[in-house]
Each structure stands twice: as structure tokens, then as C-alpha cells.
Image (cartoon, grey):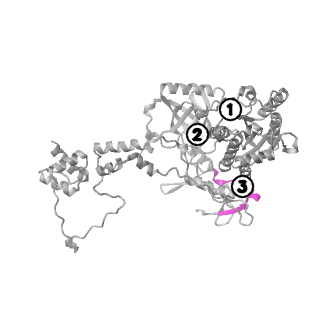
Amino acid sequence: MVMYLVEVELKVLMAEWNAFYHNEDEDEEQEEGEQTSGDYKVTGRDSLVFLVDASKEMFIKGEDGELSNFDMTMQVVRSVYTTKIISSYRDLIALVFYGTEQSKNPRNSFKHVYVYHDLDEPGATRVRDLDALLGDKGEKLAAETMGSGETSLGDALWCCANLYSDIKYRLSHKRLMIFTCRDDPHGGNSTKDRQAHTKARDLKETGVMIDLMHLMKPGGFDVSLYFRDIVSPAEDESELGLQLKPCDKLDDLRKRVLAKEQKKRSLARIKLILDEGINMAVGLYATAVTARKPGAVKLYRETNEQVRSKTRTFQTQTGSLLLPSEIKKAQVYGKKKIVMERDEVDAIKKFDDPGLYLIGFKPMEKLKLHHHIRPAIFLYPEDDQVKGSACLFSALLKKCSEKNVFAVCRCTPRRNIPPRFVALVPQKEEVDDGKVQTKPPGFNVIFLPYADDIRNLDIPHCPIASPIQVNKMKEIVSKLRFKYRSDAFENPVIQQHYRNLEALALDMVAPEETDDLIMPKVEQMDIRLGPLIDEFKNMVYPFNYNPDVKPAAKRKTADDGGGSEKKPKVEVSEEELKNHMKNGTIGKLTVPLLKDACKQFGIRVAGSKKQELIDALVAHLGS
């Protein structure tokens, strides 16, 4: 007997949530190609501490009223706060000033160190605090609140270490960024120098990555004078290490901070198997993911506490709760229900162990545009998983680039995921003028289609444009060309959504205006094109054609009682036809006119379609 199951949705307060229950739908087959968070070596929250120099040199404005280093730093810090709120609000951020006159830190153990924000989740209150430090008013407030005094970078690093030790959360990634324009903060004091190097070494031993965001100062910034031994080396070859050129522009500083702050997350870590016994560890990374608005959060109406939905499955006859082991799955085939156990479903899903299996190599010209059936992912070595992977991977990348070939592999990213054929397309490293990496070295993984994925399309037969019309359209396209960059166009819907939320959270009078960059700039396009559009219209469309005007309804004929008179016949001379052929406007003539012209010149046409009539006239008059 078939048992019908009813699902009952229970709303449970988040505070009273029982961790015993788990989601029974975990074993549902993941959609093929779904981008998940992958397997991480360590799970937990990311943390970031901004350690900012508050000395008098940081408040000096540049030439022609340029931003001071302090104001530029505060704008970048605020940008990171707002980005974290949107992308990963559970991460922890702290803001600490050193070289201050006033002291404010846990237990006030360190002089000239001012903890502006403890290590905690970013929020609207903290963003408002940062807004107060922006501009001339912000610099004045900072001078009144903190002031500028002696500098002890060792005490500041020690204070940051205490911030990390006081955190009870499990941290997966710890990073500390130092913002300063002084390359010798202690003025040659060897005792303070030695203390700072010791504390930096202690921090690095506990897993804290220390980065230097050095700013421009008169005479230049000499990294080797002091900070070379303070900062951490690059985590891997994909990251640029200590930058020698200081930042003097806001955009450069923002790019450099974001390049360091954004932690790379792998979708999966698997083996690339070149041959029997020749393996290397690689990670799969998503270089672009569709940005979506976050889903609504359900709240309990009386207390505004967050609630969660939970689905339980009951038997309709007895009302008893069904355990996952009591539920089976079935597939209907040939009007018969095939029932399977959980282990049988798992065995059916598993095709092969996760990994990339090399099949061979092909020339790059064999890879066609229609082979890209879904967004590509990026392949990079994981040397900490298998030693020597980076060296072998680099050699493979170099040879593929030199020979202009791509590798064909069978890819199984995770268990219970069907395998796919993929093309590994080599990509060389690229850096910009500020020595910030714009493209990492590695392979782009292109998912190749199966024979079942390729469709045979019935291409509709349309009138063929004349060479004159084609050349005119080429002129139009060349005038409208521009260099496309994906990072130059933001999604206006998502941007407006977060602007509205930001205005509500920060008690703003009105949200900031959002520029819709995807709307075509009609005025600029008209200026660029000039008379080309009208010339193209005259070649292609009938005389006085207006696409915005709907065609008039047909009049009734005399037989239908409409009483309309028959229009007089209009003849086209041979000279007019030749002019139309020369200008490429013969397609503007109506079918009745073309038929009459064929009768006039005694041309026999097998069909009555417009293109057949035009071809017959062109063949007759052109001979």
C-alpha cells in the first residue's frame, strides 16, 4: 500500500534551536555544476585588523589639495567595512591607531595605542563612527580624540595579539594590515626596533598574516629600511609579496587592500593525474559568481528574533514522525515504481573518485566558441597538499603556453557528481602599473559539451543583405566600438538595493543616487554616428518608414461592402530599376511592383516570393 506523506513546517525560535536535528534533504543530488563553498582546511570566521599610524605626518595634505594619507586610509577602511557587511557580515574587523597621544586599549596596558574598534562584526554603528573620521572634520576630531604622540610599533603589535587571544570564535584566517607613511617609525631606536620585530615574529607564528600598506611621503618610502622583516611573505606564488612602490592615489590603495583582504576560497581540492603515479594537488576556484540580492530573513513578530523553518515528515495514517532511515526513494520507469535504499542511491550516483585525469592535448584552434557551455573555473596548484605540485604545475603551464595547446581531462570535482570532459586553457600572469596582479598564472577550466548537449537548429531563412548594406552596417559598428571591462558595469538593481539598506541603517535622509551604467548613451551615440543611421534606414527600410507607428488596419474591399476603389497601377521604368539595383534599395519595392516589372520585361519566375522576383530582375537587367 502506498503511504502518502504530509509535510508539516514548524517555526522554531533561533535561541531555542535544537542542534540535534539535521536537514533530511542533505542527500539530495546537487545540481550539476553548482558552485559550493568547497572543502576547507580550516572552518571558521575570517578576521582583519587595521593598524593605522596616527602620527602628524599622516595628516599632511598633498599638493593641490590632495587627500591626506589619514583621510585616504579612512576611506579605504570604510569601504572594507561596508563590503564586509554585504559579502561576509560574520567576519571580524578591528581598527587600532598607534603613535597617538591618548591611550585606549584593554586594561590600558599599552601607551600611545588607541583601539577605536574591538575585533567584532561590522555594523551600521561602526560605519557611522568611521564617517566621523572622514574629511577635514574627521581629521580635527581625530586630533582632539587621539592626538599624535610617541610611537612604539611593538606595543601596537602586542595589543593586536591580545585582541586575537581574547576572541572566543574559531578563526580560519587572521590578517593584520599596517598603514603608515614613515619608513623608520622609531627614528633609529634599536630597542623599540628589536621589540617590534620580536612581536611581529610571534604574531606570524600564531598564523597572523602581516601586510604593509605604505603610503607616499616626501623623499620616497624605503621598505628595506625597517619593514621588510616585519611583514609576512606571500602565502603562495599567486600572491604578490611586499610592494616596493608606495600608494599615492585612493584607487591604488583600495585595489591593493582588496587584493590582500579577499581570501581565496576553493570550490574543491582534487588531484590532477598526469599518468600512473604522477599526481599533483590542485584547487578549483570560481573567478566570477552571479551576484544576487540576499533572501529575506524571517523574524518572530513579538520579539524580532530570527526564526528558522524546519520540515518534518509524518505518516498520514498514524501521525508518527518518520526518521530518515524509514524513508525510501523511488523512480518511475515504464509505469513501474522502482524503490531503492539509501546505499543503492549513493552507489548509483558515484561514477568515479574525485580528480582530474589527463587524456591528451589538442591545438588551441580546436577549441571553438560553442564549446563554452557554462562559466569556466580556475585551476591552481595546492603545494601544501602535495609537495612539488607547484613546480610540476608550473612546468605543465609553461609547456602548454609555448606549444599553444590545451589539455583535455576528465573531471570529477566531488563525489556523486557526474564526470565531465574539460579543456585546461593556459593563462599567463599579468600585473598592472602598480605591480598588483590582475591575472594569476594557471589554467582556465572550460567545460566541454557532450554530443547530447549540442542542438541542431533550424535556421530561419531571411532576406540576404546586399554588400552595400553590409558595408554601411560595418561603418556603424566600428563607430560604436568601445573597450569592454566587466568591472566597469555594476548591477543597478543590486546597487540600489544596498544603497536603500545603507540609508536605513545609517539614518540617512535619502539613499545615494545609483548610476545605471548599462543604459545606452543615446546622445553620445548619435554624435558618433552622425548621418550613418539615416543612410542605413534609407537603404533597408521603405520610404517614410517609422517603426513606432502601427500599421493601419486593412480596408474592406468592394465585395465586402467597404466600397473602396481600386488603386491605379504604378509602373517602374527600366532606368529606375537599375538605380535601385545600384543603390541596393531594390528590396524597398513591393511584391506587386516587382511582379508587374517582371511581366513588363517578359521575365518568367518560377515562384512568387519577393527574393525570387528580385533575383530574376537582377539577372535580367544585369546581363
Q: Is residue 88 on the magenta stretch?
A: no
**Disc 2 to disc 3, C-alpha distance:** 29 Å
Residue 102 visible here = yes
Quadrant of the snapshot with the C terminus: top left
Along the line of sight, the residue nearer the viewer: 606 or 559:
559
Type of the residue with mark 1:
Glu
Q: Please give the residue where the numbered disc 2 appears in the rendered image.
A: 413
Locate residue 309 relative to residue 202 in the image: left or right. Answer: left
Secondary structure beneath label 2: loop
Earlier in the chain: of badge 2 and badge 3, it is 3
Type of the residue with mark 3:
Tyr
Percent position (x, y) of residue 109? 88, 41
Question: Which residue is depicted at the point 35% across and 48% down?
Answer: 531
Q: How many marks?
A: 3
Question: Which residue is depicted at the point 77% across and 29% down?
Answer: 184
Type of the residue with mark 2:
Pro
Percent position (x, y) of residue 571? 15, 56
Provide the residue span drawn in magenta.
8-26
Quadrant of the snapshot with the N terminus: bottom right
Q: Residues within 10 Å of mark 1 (few under 14, many from 20)?
A: few
Q: Please give the residue where the numbered disc 3 appears in the rendered image.
A: 21
